[in-house]
Image (spheres, rainbow, N blue to C red):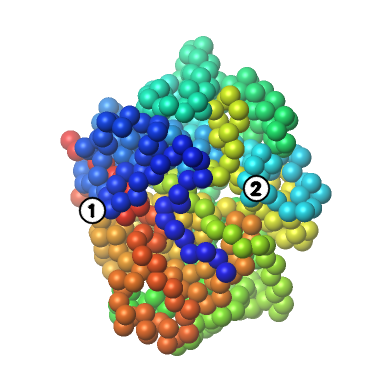
Amino acid sequence: MNTPPRIPHLPRRDFLKASILAGATILAGDSLQANDPPPKTASWQAKGNRGAVAGGSAHAVNPAAQMLEQGGNAADAAATMLLAMCVTDSSLFCFGGEVPILYHDGATGKVEVIAGMGTAPKLATLEHFSKGIPRGGPASAAVPATLDAIVTLLIRHGTRTFATVAEPLLKLLAAGKEKWHADLRVTVSQLIDAEKATTDRTSGLRAVADCFYRGPVAIALDQWSRAHGGLIRAEDLAAHLTRIEEPLTANYRGYTICKCGPWTQGPCLLQALALIEGFDVQALGRNSPSTIHLAVEALKLALADRDVFYADPQYESVPMEALLNRQYTELRRPLIDPDHASRELRPGNPLGGKALLDRSDPRFGPPSVSHDTTTCLAADAAGNFVAATPSGWGGVLAGSTGVWLNSRLQSFNNWPHSPNRIIPGKRPRITLTPTLILKAGRPVLAISVAGGDGQDQTTLQLVMNYVDYGMAADASVVASRFGTNHHIGSFGQTPPSLGSLLINPDLGETTIAALKAKGHAVQTVGGALWVPCVIQRDETGGFHAAGDPRAGRHAAAISF
């Protein structure tokens, strides 16, 4: 049985002392000056008409807001926040991690995916992992993607240099007391020096990426990896690229929902919303027993398809068009019994035009806990929006580089016929899943959620809160939530908890009793059940940003 999420995920690194109180800031206690309070401009919610940001620590959110104040755009602000969070949220995200990004261009109206996920190294073969993929340590690291994703975002959409957006990061590192802070400061300074040796901004940003992936940093990472049992080599780093992809989209009651592709779990949100659209949840009422039941049952079906079909489409034939087809949705919707909770894993057969697979033999790994990430959103008055979900937990420190590496290979499996089996050069199917919502081609909501397999479960509720119930951003992020572990876990493929329903107890004894009567295995979970941030833009052009204060999320906004 999966362990219920405990949000935020407390770090395993002994230097971090997180204080999680209502409205508290998540701080690396030993890495920032004790008498350095969070900036007053960063709170858990904010409103403005010129731009907004939302994310993790106030010490990362505030510099991002200052970037907007100084004339930077949403891409510049997001890059600033992401780099700073490598220190302030370092138990959840790291310089050697990953960050899928959705970007809306206010000038063109286009949405694109900046696919900030690294691949399995060339040595990461099925044969190498015949006895299992480790949950941590040097051999569990995918190729680092964080830096190249940030550089790609800046090249394509930003206006600032790497040195400018990295300035808050350098200040945080200079104030830190851990050895890795000083080491990472040297590495970041190398990147800035490479940029300064060029003649224009774009060439400088490319030089930053070259220094890390094909220059002295790559050599240092290769040497450390060879000496400590890692699989990453200089050729893996040199071959890394950040793919630019079209988002997957679906219509939900007149709104366009934008997600990353099936190398993430993101499309399961589109599948779940398509199922829910066939019910009048507005009439049933927000968080009524019937609405919660329908949402959870829809999630079970969508997650079952995720576990069977989703994988890196560069390597696998993922039937995404068929999975999102309206006829397939209509075949699956009758599987939702309004009176009884499912206790089975029920993937469908989209290519065969059937509601259920004729045969499903799910495989599982050993039980384990899920891991968390952090959050990053930015928007500006020109209509540019960034929604990103940064991660990179549980890795190892790559020696004197100061770079913490991820442990993302554990999101693969080693089952020969699975679409998500580990193959060199392939991306693991990850939980990281930012969201953009458009109305008539204009962004109205950006969402980023931390919390492993619960990310799209929380996003589903945020979408319904906005579209079906007209809730404002600040009310939505603190609203009571629910979810399920009725799925195969994405970290080591842990067994499902069939029929499980996780729920905040303040939804009330009557509601909980009604859900138990429908057959749900209810477990109450206090506090923040997963960790959301949102930026909402209203019809007047105003921004409403908020992050759940129970989990130390922060937001800031600026006005003319």
Q: Position of residue 301 (x, y in %)?
A: 55, 73
Say if mark 2 contacts mark 1, CB within 8 Å: no
Which quadrant holds residue 2?
bottom right
Residue nearest the viewer, comparing 163 with 480: 480
Which quadrant holds residue 253?
bottom left
Q: Amino acid at mark 2?
A: Leu
SS for tag 2?
Answer: helix
Can see residue 313? no
Q: Residue at x 53, y 81 (%)?
A: 342
Q: Going by the picture, which residue comes out furthest to the front?
A: 14
The residue beneath circle 1 is 539
Residue nearest the viewer, comparing 3 with 455: 3
Crowding around mark 2 (Cα neighbors within 10 Å: few <14, some 14 to 19, many 20+) is many
Q: Amino acid at mark 1?
A: Glu
The residue beneath circle 2 is 409
Q: Residue at x 70, y 36 (%)?
A: 230
- Mark before the other along the chain sequence, 2 or 1: 2
Q: Position of residue 455 (x, y in %)?
A: 46, 58
Q: Residue at x 63, y 46 (%)?
A: 136
Q: Left of 60 or right of it: where is 189?
A: right
